[in-house]
Image: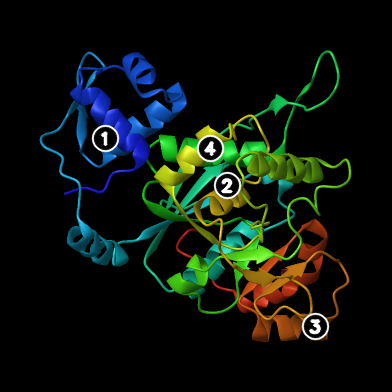
Amino acid sequence: MTQLTENQNKVIDGLKNGHNSIESLVTSTGLAKRTVIGTLTSLLKSELIVKEEDDTYSINGFIEVAGDDQETENQERNDVQPIQVLIPYLKSEAAGDELKIALRALQQNLKMPFEVVIIGDQEDWFSPEITYIPHEQHLVKEVCNCPAPAMIRNPQADVNHKIFTAISSGIISGNFILSNDDIFLLAPTYPEDIGILKAFRDDLNKTGTGTSLYAQNNLRAAKALAANSLPSVRYGTHTPMLFNADKLLEIIEKYNCLENGYPIESLYFNELYPDARPLILSGDANDSLLASAYRADIPKNVLDNVFKERKFLNSNSKGWISIKEHLEEAFPNPSRYEL
């Protein structure tokens, strides 16, 4: 028995009613073409449908929706299967060996079976232990009151496209962890550490001031959420986060995240958990869980305490200068992800 998402049910119903091509499924389900393709891919990977030689699709036998007992059994089975850790990567934005160190920290401290998937650019030291998905930078039209908007790289829209591509390819499915090349696990980290909702105190509106792309993305996301009577909690804490691939595809489609540089984690968690009271992080000296290194001159004694007491560390290019030596001392040995 199988637990289906809303979009999977729509596609299955369409197939049952004789709509066995992508175009006819787009018409019958009302879903966008890219969503239909992504949903078909997930169903193919689950072996619930088959693709015929003429590029049509058919149901692979009888599909029965799982009840609570079966869901529990499936969940218990999934608990021992490796979870995928997806890392979008843009080499030109890397300040150094952040990705290599981040993978060493994952291997040492992530206390669950996992597999690494990297989408974007490739390093020559990647080992076969990494599932690599090539991806070119995704450009979108700038948001402006101008007659001819330029095509620009909006970093968040680019990340959204990478995530969508990884899911639509069928490589990422089910529950997965989204992380970054500059997120480091400093201590043993368990599924519960990843799954708990975390947010910043200032919401998207408060950080949506100014002319930067980051501020514009946050403000437009807050407006999109408000239009759906949803809160604007800012979940982009730059820590590893747990997502469901099928539910995330639905969010991407609903908010057209491929062309809008929305912070996708804030859309996702505000949609799914509108009444949540997340753990509030700050990344500063008062935070007991997260440290954010955004200065090149962080004192050694401060970093010593961070590495002793915090679980998550993130940085930007300036902060990398401060933390590089500490990270190399903490994680000196190559991981299985390095040649």
State the scheme by which the image is colored.
rainbow
Residue 92, can we see it? no
Helix or strand or loop: what does disc 1 sit on? helix
Q: Quadrant of residue 213?
A: top right
Q: Are marks 4 and 2 in contact (CB under 8 Å)?
A: no
Q: Residue furthest front?
A: 229
Helix or strand or loop: what does disc 2 sit on? strand
- Give me the disc on residue 88: 2
Give the percent coordinates (x, y) of residue 180: 60, 55
Q: Which of the two discs, 4 and 2, sits closer to the camera?
A: 4
Disc 1: which residue: 44
Mark pair 3, 2: CA separation: 30 Å
Mark pair 4, 2: CA separation: 16 Å
Q: Reply above or below: 187 against 138.
A: below
Q: At label 1, which amino acid type do we have?
A: Leu
Choose the circle earlier in sequence order: 1 or 2. Answer: 1
Q: Are marks 1 and 2 in contact (CB under 8 Å)?
A: no
Q: At label 2, which amino acid type do we have?
A: Pro
Q: Residues within 10 Å of mark 1 (few under 14, many from 20)?
A: some
Disc 3: which residue: 302
Disc 4: which residue: 252
Camera-nearest residue between 166 and 17: 17
Mark pair 1, 4: CA separation: 20 Å
Q: At label 3, which amino acid type do we have?
A: Val
Choose the circle earlier in sequence order: 3 or 1. Answer: 1
Q: Is 262 on the left-hand or right-hand side of 104?
A: right
Q: Quadrant of residue 102?
A: bottom right
